[in-house]
Amino acid sequence: MANATTKRPAPQPAETRARYAFTVADYHQLIASGHFKRTDRVELISGELTIMPPIGPEHSFHTTRITNTLPLKLPSGVWLRMNEPITIGNHSEPQPDAAVVRERPDGYRSAHPGPKDVLLIIEVADTSAAFDSQVKSKLYSKAGIPEYWIMDVQEGCLQVFTEPSSRGYKHIQVLERDDTVKSVSINGLAIEVKELMP
């Protein structure tokens, strides 16, 4: 009697084809040629154009909290940028909900901030928690961005990612509304979670 063999499942159609990895230059060219506008909810992640979820009232509520609360806590020499791109290598240009970057004389007029300019990234996750915690966290960690916060609206908590490595952040802390988050990358920044997520 012949030995039984285990059949491998057939690959899905999407797995049988190579994918074209867009570069940041390709992405900018698509914008320049009118394929979509900067105001469209599109970002470049690891060579793929991804459509971001539409901004609902809950998301806007939390980004407004960041806009009105965080600048009061920041030291001199850093800026808060809201919904603005950062360039990571040749194949990624995400648009985080908030990023704290080093101040620069030209105000980033000639180029978007890169990983060495970014101290902290904050994403508001009302419908995107899985993508933000799995895909974006790896992208930011590999780029060496020292600190990443996810405001998980559905779970009512703040996830704090620190100690970046090529395989992902080594330390993840989950804070509740009554906790205080103390930044490891921005001197003197400490804020109660409920100030951001009341």
Image: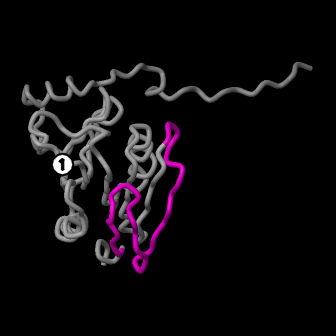
Residue 95 sits in quarter = top left
**Residue 96 visible to an observer of this rendering:** yes
Give the residue pinned by disc 1: 103
Residue 104 sits in quarter = top left
- Residues rendered magenta in the picture: 165-192
Q: Residue at x 40, y 40 (%)?
A: 144
Does the magenta-highlighted stretch encompass residue 150?
A: no
Front residue of this view, candidates 119 and 123: 119
Does the magenta-highlighted stretch encompass residue 167?
A: yes
Classified by dominant secondary structure, the portion drawn in magenta counts as: loop
Q: Residue at x 32, y 50 (%)?
A: 119
Residue 23 sits in quarter = top left
Front residue of this view, candidates 8 and 163: 163
Quadrant containing the N terminus in the rendered view: top right
What x and y, as percent, mark residue 43?
A: 25, 40
Front residue of this view, candidates 68 and 15: 68
What x and y, as percent, mark residue 178?
A: 41, 80
Which secondary structure lies at badge 1?
A: loop
Residue at the right extreme, as displayed: 1
What x and y, as percent, mark residue 170?
A: 54, 49
| Amino acid type assigned to the residue bearing label 1 in the image | Glu
Instruction: Tell me: residue 37, above or below residue 123.
Output: above
Q: Residue at x 62, y 29 (%)?
A: 9
Instruction: Tell me: residue 17, above or below residue 42.
Output: above
Quadrant containing the C terminus in the rendered view: bottom left
Q: How many marks?
A: 1
Within-10-Å neighbours for mark 1: few <14, some 14–19, many 20+: some
**Residue 80 visible to an observer of this rendering:** no
Instruction: Tell me: residue 191, above or below residue 111.
Output: below
On screen, residue 9 versus residue 152, left or right, reads right
Q: Residue at x 41, y 58 (%)?
A: 184
